[in-house]
Amino acid sequence: MTNLLQAAEAARQFEIPGELAAIEPYGSGHINDTFCAVFQEGSTPLRYILQRINTAVFKNPAALMENIERVTAHLAARLNGNPDRARRVLQLIPARDGRRWAMNAEIGCWRAYRFIERARTYDAVESVEQAFQAGQAFGRFQQLLADLPAPRLHDTIPDFHHTPKRFAAFERAVAADTAGRARDARAEIDFAFAHRPMAGVLLDAGLPERVTHNDTKFNNVMLDDLSGEGICVIDLDTVMPGLALYDFGDMVRTTTSPAMEDERDLSKVTMQFPMFEALTRGYLSAAGGFLTNAEKELLVFSGKLITFEIGIRFLTDHLAGDTYFKVHREGHNLDRCRTQFKLVESIEKQEDSMNRLVSELAAG
Ligand code: ADP
Ligand code: GN1
Ligand code: MG
């Protein structure tokens, strides 16, 4: 974990005018360390987001930052003329040495963004309007990046959504049982094996490669405080070539259940049909124009698959002794796995009606 002194030292590496007045940990992500820094220039305090990139997870930060630079520049160009552009696309602050990020042995690898004010993220969805807004914002994100000029973006994490490879890693973790936890996770392990046949379906469907976000958690879209509009997609570390359905699937995973990802009371975890309807309407309002029929037919399936995939990733990490996702309590990854599998079951129960709805929406 990064301490505040390191974060303050990192903050001073960037082209930010004024004096550092305050800095504190921020957000609830599982991978990077995020801080909010306040700089005071004269009487005006301005906020910034500082992030330490987890280089155990992102092994090539230079490639990752090049992706982010290209993607944010493209989005900014596409939003040219929009009076609210500064809040609708992340804006990197350059480091004092002119690079887009700062790095040294003491502090690690850091970037800084302008703070998007008068908007916020939510860890759990609260209304159908929010679900619609999230779907539309991520759909628009894909749409705006559809004409990103060559070359292809770097794969910041190769095979990130390759579910069969995720499954193979899970099987290895069960066999190794490094942390001696397999015995107490029998029900979850059995659930995973029973669902193995679906792992390869998206990859085998011959769907087109697009520029996708790949981590479309509901808390990765900022909603405007006044209008509720989904104004800015954030957390761009995994923007890379992928399938549109990786994004839609992760939206279903995180935007249809009212429960937190680590909720222990599984009775609260459920795929709420009205949320799914709003999410799908929002997504199709932006992405409906470019999606192929094959993609539309697999929208519901992608929700089930990506929820399953993240579930087996949490379970794998639990079995391996919590080396990947940040954990804040004993059994945290197992709790997260359980909510995912509960949600898979909830989707399975409603799959037919969800598919009927998508056919109606896609047709008209
Ligand atoms: P993580 O990978 O850890 O999830 P994020 O990039 O999603 O990191 O940032 C963590 C949180 O910080 C977000 O959920 C959001 O609330 C906040 N945040 C990130 N970037 C900005 C920004 N530019 N302006 C305001 N808040 C931000
Ligand atoms: C991680 O960084 P964060 O918390 O937005 C993970 C995602 C998972 C998510 C589960 C690089 O996302 O793939 O879906 O946790 N990111 C990475 O909450 O592995
Ligand atoms: Mg995030």
Image: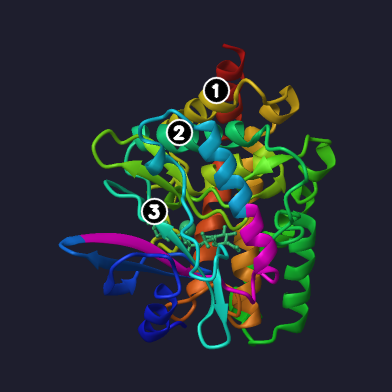
**Residue type pointed to by label 2:** Phe
Label 1: which residue?
357
Q: 140 or 248: nearer the eye? A: 140
Give x and y (percent) for residue 125: 37, 45
Q: Is mark 2 on a helix, strand or loop?
A: helix
Give x and y (percent) for residue 338: 53, 63
Residue that appears at 79% across and 57% down? 164
Q: How crowded is mark 3: few (under 14 residues within 10 Å), some or many (20 or more)?
A: many
Instruction: Determine if the C-beta at disc 3 is less than 8 A from ligand 2.
Output: no
Query: How far is disc 1 from disc 3 in space, using C-alphas?
Result: 23 Å
Q: How crowded is mark 2: few (under 14 residues within 10 Å), some or many (20 or more)?
A: some
Q: Residues within 10 Å of mark 1 (few under 14, many from 20)?
A: some
Q: What stretch is highlighted in magenta?
A: 45-67
Label 2: which residue?
273
Q: Looking at the image, is 243 positioned above or below residue 215?
A: above
Residue that appears at 69% across and 60% down? 156
Label 3: which residue?
259
Q: Looking at the image, is 136 positioned above or below residue 242?
A: above
Along the polypeptide, which appears first: circle 3 or circle 2?
3
Q: Quadrant of residue 315?
A: bottom right
Q: Can residue 348 be seen in this view?
A: no
Q: 155 or 326: nearer the eye? A: 155
